[in-house]
Each structure stands twice: as C-alpha cells, then as structure tokens.
Amino acid sequence: MTSAAAQRIASLRTEIERHNHAYYVLDAPAIPDAEYDKLFRELQGLEEKHPELLSADSPTQRVGGKVLDGFAPVRHAVPMLSIRTETDTEDSGAFNFDTRVRNALGSPDDNIEYACELKFDGLAINLRYQGGVLVQAATRGDGETGEDVTQNVRTIHCIPLHLNDCDAEVLEVRGEVYMSRRDFNRYNDKQRAQGLPTLVNPRNGAAGSIRQLDPALAARRPLSFFAYGLGEVQGWALPATHSAILDALQSFGMPVCADRAVVQGAAALAAFHAAISAKRDALPFDIDGVVYKVNSLNLQDELGFVSREPRWAVAHKYPAEEQLTVVRDIEIQVGRTGKLTPVAKLEPVFVGGTTVSNATLHNADEIRRKDVHIGDTVIVRRAGDVIPEVVGVLAERRPAGARAFVMPDICPVCASRVVREEGEVDARCTGGLFCAAQRKQAILHFAGRRAMDIEGLGDKLVEQLVDEGIIHSLSDLYRLDEATLAALERMAEKSAQNIVAALQKSRNTTLNRFLFALGIRHVGESTAKDLARHFGKLDAIIQADAERLLAVPDVGPVVAQSIVDFFSEAHNIEVVQQLRDLGVQWQEHDGVSTEPLPLSGKTFVLTGTLASLGRDEAKSRLEALGAKVAGSVSKKTDYVVAGAEAGSKLEKARELNVPVWDEQKLLDQLQECEKA
Ligand code: IVH
C-alpha cells in the first residue's frame, strides 16, 4: 500500500534528519553508524520502489547526479553587503566602532547592546528556504548577483534540507561555508600520502569545493556551515534583536556557532575580542576576526548604511594566519625513524600571532609540486597549533639567483645513505641509532612516560648528552653517574641525583614497555603489548620470523617485516644485550596463555574529552586488556567512561543504569589490570 509506504518514508526521513542534526550540528551521534546506514538504506529502497514519493528534500537526495556546465546567475532579493573592517589589533577597533554608533544615534552616553560573533574565514552563502524547504543556495558574487550552487551546498551535511517548525513563506539564511581545520588537515594528509595536490588553506578548500562543477567531487570535500544573518524574509515575524534571530535559526536546526555573546558598551566588545584571541588557536576552524553588531533591529534600521556597508556592524580583525616572506635556505630535519623533512628557513615573519622562522615543506614531492626554490617569496601559513607550513610560491617574484632544492642522498647529520622506498613519499636516513639526530629522538622516545618513564630526561639534556659525546647508544644512559651529569652546564647537583634515581627506578620495567621504548618502526604501544603477551619472552621475539610474528593479533606484514629488520641489525641486538647487562629487567612468561585477559568480554563506551589519556590511547589500552570499545551506549554496554563535556552518551548511560567512570577511575583500573 502506497499510503503505508508514504507514512514509513515520512517517518524515516524525520528520523534520519534528526540523526543528521545530532551528528553534524550537535556533534553528538545518538545511534551507531551501522544503525544509521540501515535506516538510510531502508529509505532508499522505499523511494526506489515508489519513485512518485521521492522529493528533493529527502536526505537521500543530498548528492545530485549531473555534472554542471556552469553556474546559473542568481539575483539576490536583498543585496549581500560586506562589513567595514577595523584592521588594528588594539582595543581602539572596539572603541572607534562604539563611538561611531553612539554619535550616529545621537545618544552619547548610552550603553549600547551588541551581539558579538566570530568572523568565519570561508565563503558567504545565501540559503533560500520556502515553506521550510531548501530551494536554492547562492554565492555572494558581487553582492547583487551570485551563482547558483544549490547542488553542491546540498552535500553539506550540517545544512538542513528543511527547517524544523518553520514554514515561513520565504526565509533566506545567510552564513559562511567553511572547512574545519581537522577536515582540511586530513584531506591534505591523504592527498600528500598519494602524491596528489594539497589545498592551500581551508578557505580555498571551501571556495573551491563550492564552485566545483562535479557534485560528486564536491561531496568528497568535507564542508561545514555557520548561520550569521538573514536575507529576504516573508511570512515570518522578525524578533526584536539579532541575537534572537540567531536563537530562532538554531531552533530551526541551523548550525549557529556557540562562541557568541550579547554585551553592552565598548569595553565589553574589547573584552570579547581579547577572550576570542586567547582561544583562537584552539578553535576547530579558522577565523580572521570577530564581528560586532548592534543587537536591536530598530537601532540597526535607524543606523542604516554608508556606501554599501551597514553602520551597525564592524569586523575587528586579528593578525593574519598567512604572510609573505622569503626562503633563505632549505634544511633537512631528521626524525626518530630517520624520516628526512625539508624545512624552510625563513626571513622571520609575524604570522598567526607569533614570529615564525621555520616552516615545514613536508617532503621532496611537495616541494616539487609547489615549486619552492631557495630565494623564493612564499606564503607561510600558521593556524591553530599545527607547525607552520609553506603553502605557495609567488613565482613572479623569483630572483635571478634562486636555487632548486635537491634531497641529499646522504644524511646531513650522520652521512649514512638516504633511501626512498618504492611507493613511499618520505626519504629516510639508514643510519639508525648511529645517526645523532635519530639517536636524540630515539633517546627521548626511550625515556618517554609511556616507555621507560625516565623522569627529568628532557630534550635539552639529551641534546647536551649526545652533542658532547657522552651518550652514543641507549645503553650509555645506564652508565651515567652523578659526577658526569653534575659537570654539565646548567645542571645542579640535586637534579643530577634525581636523574640517576629516575634511571635506577626505570630499570625495573615490563616487556611491553621495553619493546615500545626500543622505537621499532610501526611498533606502537598496543603492538608492543600484543607482542609481549603473545611471546612472553624477548628472545622469542628476537628469534621469531615474519610468519610467527604474523600470528600475533593485529600484526600485519609491514609490522612483521619491520620487527625482523630491527632485530637482524647486529647493533640493535648489542644495545639490547647491553641494556640487560646494565640491569634493565622485566618479568617473562611462557607466551600466549589460554587464560582470558582481565577485561575479556567487557564492552566500554568512551565519551567526552579524556584530558590526560586521550581517547585513542584509552581505547588501545582497553583493547589490549581484552575489552571491546563500542561507539554507542546500549544495554550491552558494561561501562561508560565520561570525560569533560560528555553529552548524549552519558545521558543514555544514566538512563540505562550503566556504570559511569571518570577518567581517574579508568586510569586506576587500567593500571590495576595492566599489572595483573
Ligand atoms: S555579517 C551586512 N557576520 O565577512 C552584514 N559576516 O564583509 C553582513 N563573515 O564575506 C555580514 N563571519 O561572509 C557577518 N559573523 C559574521 C561573519 C561574516 C564571516 C563574512 C561574510 C562576508 C564578510 C563581511
């Protein structure tokens, strides 16, 4: 019966939209992906069977089919204006704006109410909803006429295809399409690993995707959206303030950024500017400033416009996250596993709030693709807490003497051969622990908290120890005495004692920590645990061939080969023997036991931010103890671990009476079980 199908289709659409909203807007998925997929497939199936019931606002219709020839022009019913910018980074931006507003209103003493928002660094878009259904999306263009990009905008999951409880005849929502830093970095990492071109910055990523003629390609680029205003409105009673408009949009299911405030007076504007500046690096997306808007719509009307800019709004900028500078040289940095990273030595430049004089160039292919020469003027980007990078070259500014970069074929630190394995983008030094750069990194890794946990052995000290020739190999660490340490520059006697004590303490360890500490390529903490559990004895691992290693859960051919390679190097075996001779020890056992692991059969769900552990580590440690870590809470969940800002999963746990642990409890339990 079609009517039963129609009902089911309607209810599936509502439910799927609800889950989309929870996932993409609230960032708090309510059901596992597999459940979602089931609903989605059921809807697709029904729509195929009943094509007459298909409608454009169905969640199955986000990705359209046809490649376009171009974008049709769209004349904006209400022009899309720009706002005046205060470029200074001082408070005067806030005070100047407030003074202009009060003068224009002829109310010099008033404490004007302002809505403060972020200035998102993306692409302005107008979304037109009729009767609550998204009918058109257009770019700003010249402000009067933009381009019809409906097909691509529909692929942005956080943009509702229809609004909740809003059947306004016409409601145009304006806002910014952007690419989050995480999505941008992931996209670029993936591209780089395949030797494909990368995006210059998230803004170009967003703009490029929106103007992509093939909607399937556009859909591959992950975009997001924040609403910040309105265009044409018919059949909807406007609230009295801008902040109330944003509240209403949020209740319709529109993504509205939570970092906003309603304040009074200039000092509070300046305080908002400062508060956001302090957290700018930690935001998940790029911003280039904040925006102040007079909150009352009546006052906005009264203030009106000057030369196509509203008098009631201003953008107060931050220092740019991209700057031009000159590459003085390209040097090579050698990492722990021998990876050679070319680093641009720059004419120091103030970018993203700090002075930058080094920027990564990633690898040789990337340099070739971007065509970076020594002497070039380049664009440097530093956004968030990622390492600054060179994102592009101004070819027309290349000086006559510019030099191309050549990846050296011997290591600049230890003169060992440099190789680039087939299918790999990275060049590597083959020197291993013979290479001072790798040695420094290897020692730091060895001493790390999750490895041998040698407290006080930081990078400054390791640098000194290696550079002064005191430490040549890992085992030399355990030959250090107080006198040698105390003789070092900037080393107090007490610190020397502490380090010797920390070294002593670290001699008693576990096989898995020791294995992890050796820094074998591809052997992370959890693989080290699997190996220790499976073999029980170090010598058994040293003697194992690839085939026997493959019997360990989660060990694949690449990992197995890397272990075999490591232990086939005589000097690695020697270092291990020396460490043992110097008193490094652990308990051994006979290998795979048939006993179940301490957490076998238990299912955990992790939610919220785990500040000290991080979710990845929590997950791998739980799994190493035999637990299953699931994505959503159900009756089958044994424990929920809730970190800071846990949301719907925590609620669900309480509903179902599932025991909830905080991070400390988890840490205690993990330690307990790992000892066992
Ligand atoms: S309001 C009439 N609010 O900045 C006022 N714009 O020149 C219209 N932008 O390209 C703009 N974040 O896309 C407004 N919170 C925000 C914004 C914002 C970013 C962009 C906008 C436009 C430019 C304004």
Image (cartoon, rainbow, N blue to C red):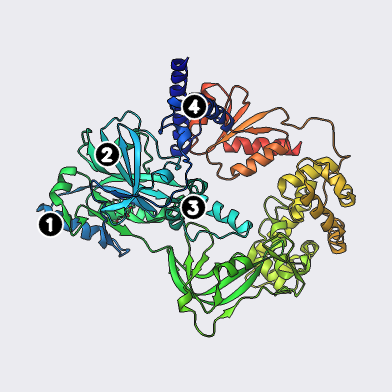
Give the number of the mark in front: 2 or 1: 2
The kind of residue on which mark 3 rests is: Arg
Element marked by disc 2? helix
Residue 323, above or below 642: below
Q: Is residue 264 visible?
A: yes
Which residue does the image show at 39% across and 35% down from the upper left? 161
* Separation of residues labelled 3 and 1 (CA atoms): 40 Å
Which residue does the image show at 40% across and 64% down from the upper left? 320
Judged left or right of residue 205, residue 317 is: left
Query: Residue 181 got which mark?
Result: 3
Element marked by disc 4? helix
Which residue does the image show at 11% across and 52% down from the upper left? 105
* Separation of residues labelled 2 and 3 (CA atoms): 28 Å
The kind of residue on which mark 1 rests is: Asn
Whichever of callouts 2 and 4 sits on the residue coming sooner in the sequence is: 4
Whichever of callouts 3 and 1 sits on the residue coming sooner in the sequence is: 1
* Separation of residues labelled 2 and 4 (CA atoms): 35 Å
The kind of residue on which mark 2 rests is: Ile
**Label 4 beta carbon within 8 A of ligand 1:** no
Q: What residue does disc 4 label?
A: 47
Whichever of callouts 3 and 4 sits on the residue coming sooner in the sequence is: 4
Q: What residue does disc 1 label?
A: 103
* Separation of residues labelled 3 and 4 (CA atoms): 36 Å
Task: Tell me which corner region of the image, top left, top right, bottom left or bottom right, holds residue 345.
Answer: bottom right
Judged left or right of residue 415, residue 127 is: left
Whichever of callouts 1 and 4 sits on the residue coming sooner in the sequence is: 4
State the quadrant of the C terminus. Answer: top right
Would you call the spot at circle 3 few (<14 residues within 10 Å), some (14-19), or many (20 or more)?
Answer: some
The kind of residue on which mark 4 rests is: Glu
Q: What residue does disc 2 label?
A: 245
Give the number of the mark in front: 2 or 4: 4
Element marked by disc 1? helix
